Image (tube, grey):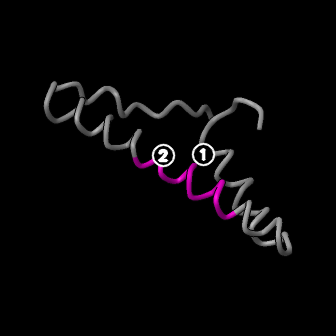
Amino acid sequence: MPNRRLEDRIRELCARVIREKDPQWENAIHELQRASHEHCLRLDHMTTAAVDIGKPEVFVERRHG
């Protein structure tokens, strides 16, 4: 999958899960689980930085518009 924002990848995987049939459905579910896990790890690291290191600016929204 091309390198892009994780949130976009999760949205695409959710759409794939809805439209795929067996056995592709199972592959899409596994990819979605991995992406969700990666997202959770990123949030955990951001939270740790904000709380422990005192850098709340890590939560600045990157989207424009």
Question: Judging from the image, what secondary structure is the residue with disc 2 in?
Answer: helix
Instruction: Give the image location of residue 41, x and y in percent.
Output: 39, 43
**Residue 16 covered by magenta stretch:** no
Residue receiving disc 2: 39
Q: Which one is in front, 35 or 5?
A: 35
Assign the C terminus to one quadrant of the image. top right
Q: Amino acid at mark 1?
A: Glu
Q: Nearer the viewer, residue 58 or 33?
A: 33
Q: Residue furthest front?
A: 23
x 41%, y 49%: residue: 40
The residue at the point 37 percent across, 43 percent down is 43
The x, y position of residue 35, in whole percent, is 57, 49
Per the model, the C-alpha gap separating discs 1 and 2 is: 8 Å
Quick check: 33 left or right of 22?
Answer: left
SS majority, magenta: helix
Is-magenta flag for residue 38? yes
Q: Earlier in the sequence, mark 1 or mark 2?
A: 1
Q: Could you classify mark 1 by the number of other residues whose Cα lies within 10 Å: few (under 14), some (14-19), or many (20 or more)?
A: few
Find residue 52 and report its horizontal and vertical position in percent: 13, 31
Image quarter where the N terminus lies is top right
Count the numbered circles shown. 2
Residue receiving disc 1: 7
Image quadrant in which you'd find residue 63: top right
Pointer 2: residues within 10 angstroms few (<14), some, or many (20+)? Answer: some
What's drawn in magenta, residue-wise? Answer: 29-40
User: Residue at the spot x=68%, y=46% of the render?
Assistant: 9
Labels 1 and 2 touching (C-beta < 8 A):
yes
Identify which residue, 65 or 44, lies in the foreground: 44
**Which quadrant would residue 50 be assigned to in this image?**
top left
Q: Amino acid at mark 2?
A: His
